[in-house]
Image (tube, grey):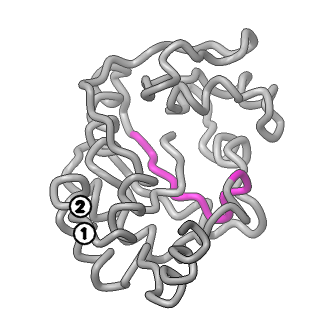
Amino acid sequence: MFGGTFDPPHVAHVVLAAAAIEQLALDILVVTPAGVPWQKVGSRQISPGATRLEMTQLAFAGVGGVEVSDIELRREGNSYTVDTLEALAAPDTDLFLLLGTDAAGGLDTWERYQDIAALATIAVFPRRGHESAAPPDEFAWQLLELPGLEVSSTDIRNRVSNARPIVGLVPEAVRSIVEREHLYRIDPADRSATDEQTS
């Protein structure tokens, strides 16, 4: 399982998916855009779920072995990873949960984290500035090897809001949706107010 807000999905997400499938010998990688990402609610505006799902489906369309699921978007209330893992669990199935080192280090703050530890092995990929972070002791985990691609959704949103190009940072189909839906743009009036506050 590879969950996230995917607001927007970018090329590093795609590279990670392909690497995880190869290194973990996965039969399938289920990519799950969050419905209500409880850790981010109130911190910023989240793009509509249908738009994030469409971007995610297009971003991973060329990666064999990936299935983009709307399971968390269809669920009411906050999106908790443990609920999705329970839904994916099946006899004779080994579950892996893909997480960056930044998130893995705080797993013991997640909803029903003990159940997550019982359900899945954590597959950890390195994130800049958090290279030494690791899951808490109760989690079984292994480290993935990845090329040094440092792209983040936060950086992409900031680039768009500042009218800077994102070509090459996201799949072209995703860039088209960002433009079509006018995602991540700051209203000129809001930008003026921000400039006045920081001047």
| Label 1 element class | helix
123 over 180 or under it: above or below: above
Going by the numbered disc 2, the residue's amino acid type is Ile
Q: Nearer the viewer, residue 155 or 24?
A: 155
Would you name the residue on which mark 2 appears?
166
Residue sitting at 48 percent across and 80 percent down? 191
Is residue 123 in view?
no
Mark 2–mark 1 distance (CA, rounded to whole Å)? 7 Å
- Asked if labels 1 and 2 touch by Cβ distance under 8 angstroms, the answer is yes
x then y, percent, for residue 34:
59, 58
183 over 119 or under it: above or below: below
Residue sitting at 23 percent across and 46 percent down? 63
x then y, percent, for residue 43:
68, 61
Disc ID at residue 197: none
State which quadrant residue 8 falls in.
Answer: bottom left
Q: Is residue 67 left or right of residue 163?
A: right
Asked if the magenta segment contains residue 24, the reply would be: no
Label located before the other in sequence (2 or 1): 2
x then y, percent, for residue 47:
52, 73
Disc ID at residue 175: 1
Numbered label tally: 2
x then y, percent, for residue 48:
53, 77
Q: Nearer the viewer, residue 3 or 148?
A: 148
Asked if the magenta segment contains residue 35, the reply would be: yes
Q: Is residue 49 left or right of residue 64?
A: right
Going by the numbered disc 1, the residue's amino acid type is Arg
Question: Which region of the structure is painted magenta?
Answer: 29-39
Q: Is residue 136 left or right of residue 146?
A: right
Which of labels 2 and 1 is toward the front?
2
57 over 11 or under it: above or below: below
State which quadrant residue 17 falls in.
Answer: top left
Is residue 142 in view?
yes
